[in-house]
Image: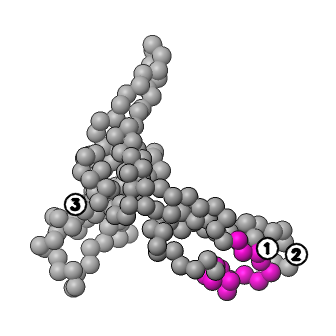
Amino acid sequence: TSADIKHCYDTINQKRLFKLMQSMVEEEMYLTKDKFVLCSKGDNSAMRCMWKKKTCPPEKFSSSTPTNFTGQYSRAIFVDGMYCSTETSRTINGLLRDHIFGQVVVANGNFGPRYLHQKNGIPQGSILSSLFCNIYFGSLEKVLFDDIFDETTSHFIRGNSSND
């Protein structure tokens, strides 16, 4: 059995989505720490830089040794914690609020551009839209199918699983 949600992004309730996103920001403070490794692919190739970021509550950061990198590279330079930033849950929730409720669409017409505030749904072109959509409809699936499927014996698969 398959189901297709018509106008998927357009039907997302912004207030419900914002409440869901707020519930995911559980900590008061978050720290983002950058790590990078400077390495070459082979003996004669040019050096390149690979960045990794980790964000979590400050107390959950482990030691600063980049052990997950060291087994993958030889002849490399590891830099850990070159840049760190902190954000409060209030700031993160404010950014989420602005992104969900503050979308403006520019429509060019005969009399110049018109600016329209998006009051329903979320924009398809946003970098966060796919994530928002998955979180939103995942929460609805949990509510709708909670009594139908047994979590220990049933599997619910989203996406196209047929060859049609």
Q: Quadrant of the N terminus?
A: bottom left
Q: Earlier in the sequence, mark 3 or mark 1?
A: 1
Q: Are marks 3 and 2 in contact (CB under 8 Å)?
A: no
Image coordinates for residue 27, horizontal then vertical, percent: 37, 64
The answer to whether 6 appears left or right of 125 in the picture is left
- Report the residue marked by disc 2: 44
What kind of residue is marked 2? Answer: Asn
Q: How many marks?
A: 3
Q: Are marks 1 and 2 in contact (CB under 8 Å)?
A: no
Q: Disc number at residue 40?
A: 1
Relative to residue 106, is residue 136 depicted above or below? below
Of helix, strand and loop, which one carries label 3? helix
Question: Is residue 110 visible to the viewer in this orientation of the structure?
Answer: yes
**Front in this rendered view, residue 112 or 73:** 73
Which residues are drawn in magenta?
66-79
Between the residue at mark 1 and the residue at mark 2, the CA separation in whole angstroms equals 8 Å
- Report the residue marked by disc 3: 140
Determine the residue positioned at 25% across, 62% down: 139
What kind of residue is marked 1? Answer: Ser
